[in-house]
Amino acid sequence: MEIIKHYFDVVIIGSGLAGCRSAIECSSHGTVGVLSKLYPTRSHSTAAQGGIGAALGNEEEDSPEWHTYDTVKGSDFLGDQDAIEIMCYDAILTIIELEHMGVPFSRTPEGRIAQRRFGGHTKDFGKTPVRRACYSADRTGHAVLFALYEQCQLKGVKFFQEFQVLDIVIENNAVQGVIAVNIKDGSLHVFESKAIVVATGGYGKIFKVTSNAYATTGECLSMLLRQGLPLEDMEFFQFHPTGLYGLGILITEGARGEGGILLNGKGERFMERYAPIIKDLAPRDMVSRAILNEIREGRGIDGKDYVYLDLRHVNKKIIEERLPEITTFCKIYMGIDPSEAPIPVIPTAHYAMGGILTDNDGRVLRDVDGSVVEGLYAAGESACVSVHGANRLGCNSLLDTVVFGKRAGKTAISQLKDVSKGKIKKERISFIVESINTIKESKGKETVASVRRDLQTSMMDKCSVFRKEKELMMLLEELQTLKERYKEIYIKDKSNIFNTELLEAIELGHMITLAEVIASSALQRTESRGAHYREDYPERDDTNWLKHTFAFQGEKGIYFKYKPVKLTRFKPEERKY
Amino acid sequence: MWGWLLHRITGVFLAFGLLYHFIVMHYIGHDNYSYDAVMQRLSEPSWKIFNVFFLFSALYHGFYGLNGVISEYVKGETVKNFSKFIMIVLSFILAFFGLKIVIF
Amino acid sequence: MDKYYTFKIKRYLPDENPQTRWDEFRVKLNSIERVLDGLIKIKETRDGTLTFRKSCAHGVCGSCAMKISGKNRLACQTLVKDMPEMIEIEPLPALPVIKDLVVDMSLFFRKNDEVLPYLINNETPPERERIQSPEDQHKILESLTCVMCGSCTTACPIFWADKEYLGPSALLKAYRFIFDTRDRAKEQRLATINSEHGIWRCHSIFNCVEVCPKQIDITKHILLLKRLAVKRGFKGGVE
Amino acid sequence: MRYRLNIGSLTWLVHRITGIILTLYLIAHIYVLSHLSDPVTYNKLMDFLKNPIFKIFELILFAIVLKHLFGGIRITLLEIGFSTKYHKTMSYIGAFLVFIIWIVGAFYFLKEAF
């Protein structure tokens, strides 16, 4: 198996918003190579609809301080407030930079970037909803990703499309490079570099009903976990309240921002009971719990397990102008027109708050004490600076990817000179090649699909919005049996060319590791906070749980360390909307 | 761009010219094909001028269309240029013969 | 209610002999399932070697463009209930096939790169965002929604014959930047598409409009480009 | 290339084929007329062309001309700004008009010829 060697100052894994934004930042000072499983504009960032939050104040008075308060309150006070402040204050400049790069935002009559209301975003510390989400119709992710990818092309960044990363090589606490396979012809490539930026996005595909794309499997997170790096706050996984029933396709919160309301079986606007002030624009964890609560108490639409998102009263022109994409989704997939019929929705797995432990400048940390892995950076959904804490507010994710993508790129470049070039040893490569061949030649009777379906179903049943200790214990056992069954997987496709079955098998191995981390993190956090709701511990316990969890992979399984939350300005208070 | 525009202009001219041509040839009078009938008509200068324009428009329109077909279906740079060159030469020969008919 | 569908799939497996063959699979699918769900069911339960691209599964990323029942569509957007009993599935036409339903898209992407697909504005950017009226933004709104799935260019008979033709997708991308009031490279872009293999190869066939999964009227945009080129021709390049 | 034909691609195909046939006919037409230099051969050629088989050819030619004419009108209308929403109806109307005019023309044509 001949190996093709490359060298880049910075290797970026993932070509979504975070990846492209850091590539733009690095391209001015060094050679940059971006690896991606998909053609860059197909990354899951393109599916983001709602908007990107920034206190520009184009439509009404706004201030980054209020944005900071909303994000801290939205995160159920688990977010590190210094990082949140950086994000909210940097937001304004970053969005303006995006516009200069060509992002075609929707515009106000005066020609400035248009903004709309969004869940959890309020004026003067929680009084009334504020227009803070800068949007481009309901295709904001698509608009920003295309602009960023185009700027990368303008700056001559080298893209390696349809390359699957097999291993991120870290030796004596310094980054050496990446081993990847070219999916098109199965050839093995080794990318040695001084710095690596991990920007691979979330891992929603671990759950059965999810809005995430097939490519979001989070294998890079598990590669780092297996090399002793911690994963932070993995128990917090956000369920978006309004996903199309049966399909998991998202109906952006922007629909509720434009006036859409949620109705239960009795036709009541039940959100009034759960969040009297801002009702349907409450943060996502609260709305998801409210919906599932209504369904569990038998108030789903004619008894079934979904509720209605009603846009019929919103004036038609606004729907056409600002929500064209979800209108086509409803027409194509459900055969209904949102301005004439209510949309059946249920909560779907959507965003991973947890991820690779990083500091405010995107550097990946090796341990709770803040020691750094030299040359390793992370940004976007795969990283956990913890600006989202226990629950992410709508349109803070696009902001997180762009702000911290830029910072990660900037730090990577600034430290290029004092990091030595990576060197990947032969044994490491042959070890990887060995592990692939064992998967390919295994004679078992299990198929990738059956193991994956069982993983997704059990995660969805036992570790979604409502969690209990007993169920989580059962889940951990099921995951152990899944690990055994994974060793018995039989691959029918033996060819080297575009072998998607082999790639899915590799991804599945990493998904099982991540699932185990999520389940055990959820088990050990005995309180309810943000998206993590324990029916046996329904109260938020600030005295002894106001801290981040760090999951390490030890020989005898997952063990945890903790670090208190950095509180600067806002003291934890009861979270009412 | 100009070639494309001329193609459209000649097209429009041909559209009307053809109707006029058809009416004159097929629907006015009887037995218009004999040598004397054709010569008699050709004696009038207006018919002569019309036919010159008609000829050039037809040749240009037809061969510009063929040029398009060639640049789409003929593979290989040299073969393509060569066949385009042949087309131009052919159109000039036809123009010469056409003119010869109309002038004399 | 579930129904049985027969998927007649054109296979191309480079390592096997014969490399190309037609496979038929009978699959049970319900009314909201799509062709992509059928393909996934076949790959999971019948034949693991069946290869196709997929990612978002709701028509926004453009990975799963293929020829379904004789017409280019996104597999994840084509509901099986709208299709006949026997669904014929082939890879996108006129592009080299890598394996089964996966084609090599690099020629298609090179076409897009030829029209300089990025905002070019070297003036010093203002303090705040550049002002653009809603009407100007609206002019490029439709051309913005393109997800570059490749269905249009590979459905155009002119592209089948002449691989040098830029193709509807690249011309739409050129439109997006030429009509963006913030762009300063209008002349350069017009020169690229004003060539023999640019807008003048479009003969208003409308195959691209028939297949666009985002319902973009691409031919209308190319006709607008033609009129702009003619206008610029007379005015000697002055706006 | 097995691809489903629709009204748009069919109209284009017909337009292209009729265009090529007309150009070839143009060459033949000029060749025939070039015999005008000598009246004797010209009249002999005219008599030869009188037999009914050429009348049928002329009738078909008439249809081809009309088809190409209306295809050209559709394309030119689209290019000067006519809404692309009606491109299909333009094709159908064009085809219908071609058929009507062809029948009317053929009626006169045959009446005069026989």
Image (spheres, rainbow, N blue to C red):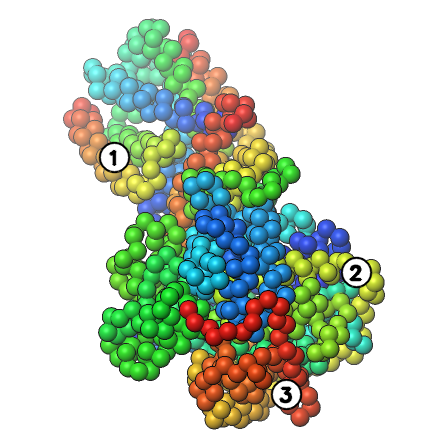
Which of the numbered marks, if any, corresponds to residue A558?
3
Which subunit holds the residue at mark 1?
D
What's the CA distance linking mark 2 and mark 1? Answer: 73 Å
- Residue sitting at 78 percent across and 72 percent down? A174
Q: Disc 2 marks which residue?
A: A416
Q: Disc 1 marks which residue?
A: D98
Disc 2 marks a residue whose amino acid type is: Leu
Q: Image check: A311 left or right of A522?
A: left
Q: Image check: A317 left or right of A177?
A: left
Q: Image check: C133 left or right of C109?
A: left
Against C104, residue C124 (above or below) is above
Q: A254 or C151, which is in the foreground?
A: A254
Q: Position of residue C188 (x, y in %)?
A: 59, 35
Q: Position of residue B46 (x, y in %)?
A: 34, 8
What's the CA distance linking mark 3 and mark 1? Answer: 79 Å
Q: Position of residue A347 (x, y in %)?
A: 40, 73
Residue C222 visible at all? no
Which subunit holds the residue at mark 2?
A
